[in-house]
Amino acid sequence: MAIEDQYQRLIEKFPEAQTVNNLISHLRIHLENNVILDLDYTKYPKRPKINLIKPNGERFTNLDMMVSSLKTWKKKKPTDIVHVLNEVLLLVDSTKASEVLINKDFFQSILALCGDQHPREMLGMLRMEDGVINEFVLPPGSIRGKDVVVFSPSRVPLDASIAGTVHSHPSGNPTPSSDDINVFRKGHIHFIVGYPYNYYTTRCYDQNGNPLSFRLVE
């Protein structure tokens, strides 16, 4: 499908979209809370560039790691741009939901990892795809001590696919400490898994340490 055809479909679906520099292949859509969705498909059928821009100008890139249609993009068989934007908007909506979704098999692997590291603490970053947490990432520059893992949130690259963190509490108490709250500054979803590392000893919190409900999905 030509760029002109993609533009017509986009305008029909998102009439509020505005062109950038009068280019029909570069659009911006204003979302809630003054967040801007920036779409550049000038090089279509190559993978489009999509950014979410916060009011302070901060850009959350790497959406291609979170949105399946971008992650599996093929130049010879490109996905319809409207479909891609629908996925992005679904992802944005999911981050505002009060219930956190995490892949069931991935959750079990996290529990197993916590058990393997016991009595030492386990810590990692969480990635989200299509609104579901499903991947573990080792924090860059992390330092493993005898009992704990330490890392600096400032060293974590700006990456829209990073939803938050997960770490274990070998003590069994899944309540966040003041140090935990400091770590929570990176991302908006944070899991603490207490010993003996099962569903009932796992808690989820937002960046301020407020409890969030979570649900396991296939």
Image (cartoon, grey):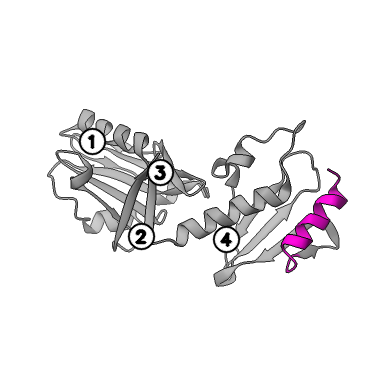
For the N terminus, give its image quadrant: top right
Q: Which mark is residue 145?
A: 1
In primary-sequence order, the first of circles 4 and 1 is 4
Q: What's under tag 3, amino acid-wise? A: Leu
Q: Residue at x 59, y 52 (%)?
A: 88
Foreground pick, 108 / 119:
108
In primary-sequence order, the first of circles 1 and 2 is 1
For the C terminus, give its image quadrant: top left
**Residue 97's quadrant in the figure?**
bottom left
Circles 1 and 2 in contact, beta carbons < 8 Å: no
Mark 2: few, some, or many residues within 10 Å (few <14, many ≥20)? some
Secondary structure mostly taken by the magenta-highlighted segment of the chain: helix
**Measured from the top left, where is residue 27 in percent x and y?**
75, 59
In primary-sequence order, the first of circles 4 and 3 is 4
Tell me the magenta residue range: 1-17
Q: Which mark is residue 133?
A: none
Residue ID for mark 3: 126
Residue ID for mark 4: 58
**Measured from the top left, where is residue 146 in percent x and y?**
19, 34
217, above or below 16, in the image: above
Foreground: disc 1 or disc 3: 3
**Measured from the top left, where is residue 21 in percent x and y?**
83, 62
